[in-house]
Image: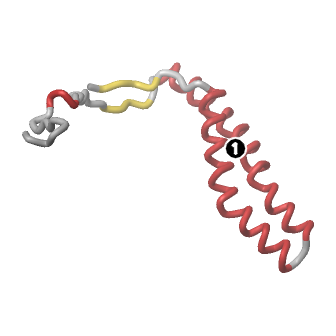
Amino acid sequence: MRKQVERISVHQTSKVLAFLHLVVAAIFLIPLGLAVIFNTGVLEGVVLMLYPLVYAIFAYMIIAILSLIYNWIAGYFGGIEITVKEMEKIHPEHTEHTYSADNTK
């Protein structure tokens, strides 16, 4: 079944992706900032540890702009098309092996 992404929520998309940028940048830059604090100086290390926040702010702005551009272009040409498939849900009561409390079955 083919579906088309007609519109992207600008704020929600920007918020989620900016948070992901924050987390990924923090994983690398906070330990690096701590190493710099212990080896070089406090100011440089603190600046490095603040970079993830700055990175997330700029990511939010850029992703918001790109989402707006996508929505504008999708209005003229249509959105990105994806193919999805319905999956059957497997319910626990429909499994082959059922065990009772005394494990006799």
Measuring 61% from the left and 37% from the top, which residue is drawn there?
Answer: 16
Rendered view: 84 above or below 7: below
For the residue pair 76 and 38, the one nearer the viewer reads as 38
Q: Coloured how? A: secondary structure
Picture coordinates of residue 101, whole percent (x, y): 19, 37
State the image quarter where residue 95 is shown.
top left
Give the residue at x 9% y 36%. 96
Number of callouts in the render?
1
Q: Is residue 37 above or below residue 84?
A: below
Q: Quadrant of the C terminus?
A: top left
Where residue 78 appears, as percent x and y from the top left, is: 45, 23
Residue 4 x, y percent position in the rendering: 40, 25
The residue tagged 1 is: 59
**Amino acid at circle 1:** Ala
Residue 79 placed where, x, y %? Answer: 45, 26
**Residue shown at the point (59%, 24%) measured from the top left:** 9
Quadrant for the N terminus in the image: top left
Return the residue found at the far front. 102
Tell me if 92 is positioned left or right of 54 in this view: left
**66 horizontally vs 39: left or right:** left
Q: Quadrant of residue 28?
A: bottom right
Classify mark 1: residues with Cα within 10 Å, few (<14), some (14-19) or many (20+): many
The foreground one among 65 and 32 is: 32
86 sits left or right of 81 in the view: left
SS for callout 1: helix
Q: Is residue 41 above or below residue 51?
A: below
**Residue in view at x 35 percent, y 24 percent:** 3
Q: Residue furthest left?
A: 105
The part of the image, by quadrant, that contains residue 83 is top left
Between 49 and 14, the one lying in front of the other is 49
